[in-house]
Image (tube, rainbow, N blue to C red):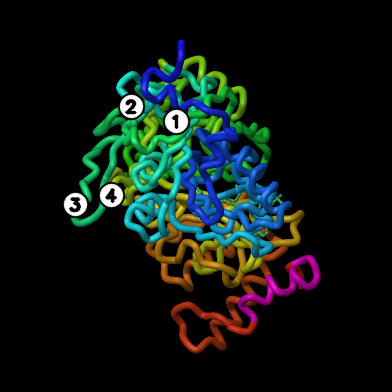
Amino acid sequence: MSRIAHAGLRSKICTADEAASFIKNGMNVGFSGFTGAGYPKAVPVALAAQIKAAHERGEAFMIGAFTGASTAPELDGALAEVDGISYRMPYQSDPQMRSKINAGISGYADIHLSHSGPQTLAGFQGKLDVAVIEVTAILENGELVPSSSMGNNTAWMTAADKVILEVNSWQSMDLFGMHDVYDIGLPPFRKPVELTHPGDRIGTTTMKVDLNKVIAIVETDAEDRNTPFKPLDDESRLIAGHLLDFLTNEVTQGRLPKNLLPLQSGVGNIANAVLAGLLEGPFENLTSYTEVIQDGMVDLLDSGKMTVASATAFSLSPEYAKKMNDNAADYRQKIILRPQEVSNHPEMIRRLGVIATNGLIEADIYGNVNSTHIMGSRMQNGIGGSGDFTRNAYISSFVTPSTAKGGAISAIVPMVSHHDHTEHDVAVIITEQGLADLRGLSPQKRAKVVIENCAHPDYKPALLDYYERAVKVANGQQTPHILNEALSWHARFLETGTMKA
Ligand code: 0RQ
C-alpha cells in the first residue's frame, strides 16, 4: 500500500536529486532528526553531491543547517564533508561536523534544544527557506504521520517557505498514534502546556502542513542510524550504583516518593547503565519525562518497572530499533513522542519534578559544569537538552568517570574551562569514586565534598592543595580561586599531554 495517500501530493514525488536542487547557496534549511532518529536520508546526500559539484566549478555553495539535535553520517556527515554548512544549530555529535566546527569552517550556535524551534519561529535565527522532514506516511487528508523523532518538525514546517518530505517505508506504520503533536505558539499568545503526568496527551497524533508549501516528496526505505551501546563496564556500574543508593536514601528520608519522580536520562553509555541498574533495583511504577528513549528504557517498560515514557525521539541500538518497529503498536500505549519544545519545556520539568541525569566533560570543585568544550576552546557535541533539564529539575545530577584519556585528564578541576551549567543549578555530581550531594552547601563546603567524594586519588592531593592555598590568598572567601593558576591544569595538558604536574 502506498504511504502517500493524498492524491494531489502524489504529483510531487520526485528523485532526491530533483528535490535537493530546490536548495540554493545561502539558504537556511530545517531538517528533521534527533539523536540519529527520523532524519531525512536521501535529500541531504543528494544536496552534498550538488554542493561538491558546485565547489568543483568554483562556485560558492553553503547552507545554514537547523535540526532537532544530532543526526547521522547521511546528513551532518555528508554536508560537513563537502564544506557545505556555514551555520549549524542546535546539538550535533557527528565527527565530520565537529571537525569542521573546530576548524572554523562551520559556525555553530549551541543553543538549548527547547529554544531552537521557538527562536526560529520568532525570527531570531534568520529566515528559514526550506524544511526537509522525514515522515512515516501522508494520509488521505494530507496530514503527516511523524517517524521516529518529533524534534522541531512542526516548527520547521511552520517557519519555512517550502517543504520537502521524505516518506520512509522502513518506519513502522504502527508509529501512528505514538505522537502527541502540540504547538505552543509565540508570546503574547503562547499556550500553557497542560500536562500533569508524563502519560498525558494534549495534542494530535499527526502533523499538519500547508500543502501549498510542499514542493517535493521523496520515497525512501532506509533505517535510522542506530548505534549499539557499549557493554556495561565496572566504572558505569559503580556510577549507576552510587546514583541508585542516593535515590534510595532520598526515598528513606521522605524527599522522594517510593516510585521516585519522572526520570530524565541523558544520552550515552553511563546513562544507559543507570537505566540497567534501575531494572535490577527496588523501584516500581517508574515514569520518565525525557528527551530520548534508549535501550535501557525499553527494558524498563518491557519489565513493567516503568509504566510510561515521554520523549521526543528514539536513540536505540539496531536490535532494539527492530524490536520497536515490530512492536510499535504495543509500545505506543506506553511511549509518547512530543515536539522538543514540549519534551524539554521548563514548565513541565519544573511541574513534574523531573530527576535529571546527564553526562559532563568536567566539573570544578565548586560545582560548575562544562558539558561541551574540551580544554576551553574545542567543541565536543553541544549542550543539547542538558540545560533545559538541569536548570528546572527537582534534583539535577551529573555522571562522569573521574578521569579521561587514560588518566591524563582529571574530570574534576580547579575551575571549568567553559561554563554550561553553573553552581546555581547543579545538585549532585557522581563519579566511579563516589557522589557529592551539593544541596544546601556553601561553595567552600561543596569544594571539600567534591574533592573528597568524586576526584580520582591521583588528583585529590593537588586539588586539595589548590583549594587550601586559594582560601589563604583569594580576594574573598565566597568562592576562593588563585586566578593565574585556576586554568593551569588545562594549559599543562595542552603543553605536555597530561594534567599531572
Ligand atoms: O572522547 O570519544 O575521543 O574517546 O569525550 O566521553 O566518557 O565516552 O562520555 O559519551 O557520556 O559523553 C559530556 C560529551 C560525555 C556527553 C558528554 C572525552 C572522552 C571521549 C566522550 P573519545 P565519554 P559520554 C540530553 C543530554 C551534552 C549533551 C547532553 C554530552 C568523549 O554527555 O555531549 O547532556 N553531553 N545531553 O575521552 C577531554 C575531558 C573529557 C574528555 C570526556 N574532561 N577532557 N576529553 N572526554 N571528558 C540528550 C541530548 O541532548 C540529545
Residue 325, given in percent of the width and then of the height, sits at: 51, 19
Q: Residue at x 74, y 57 (%)?
A: 407
**Disc 3/disc 2 C-alpha distance (Å):** 24 Å
Q: Position of residue 155 (x, y in %)?
A: 36, 44
How far is mark 4 from mark 2, CA to CA?
28 Å
How far is mark 4 from mark 1, CA to CA? 29 Å
- Badge 3 local density, few (<14 within 10 Å), some, or many (20+)? few
Which residue position holds label 1? 282
Pointer 1 or 2: first along the chain? 2
Q: x%, y% of residue 388?
A: 40, 53
Residue 386 - label: none
Question: Above or below — where is 412 with respect to 31?
Answer: below
Residue 109, image x, y percentages: 50, 60
Q: Residues within 10 Å of mark 1 (few under 14, many from 20)?
A: few
Give the mark count. 4
Mark 3 element type: loop
Q: Which residues are magenta?
A: 485-498
- Give the camera-side residue of 68 and 392: 68
Q: Nearer the viewer, mark 4 or mark 3?
A: 3
Q: Earlier in the sequence, mark 4 or mark 3?
A: 3
Q: Which mark is residue 347?
A: 4
Which numbered tag is attached to residue 189? 3
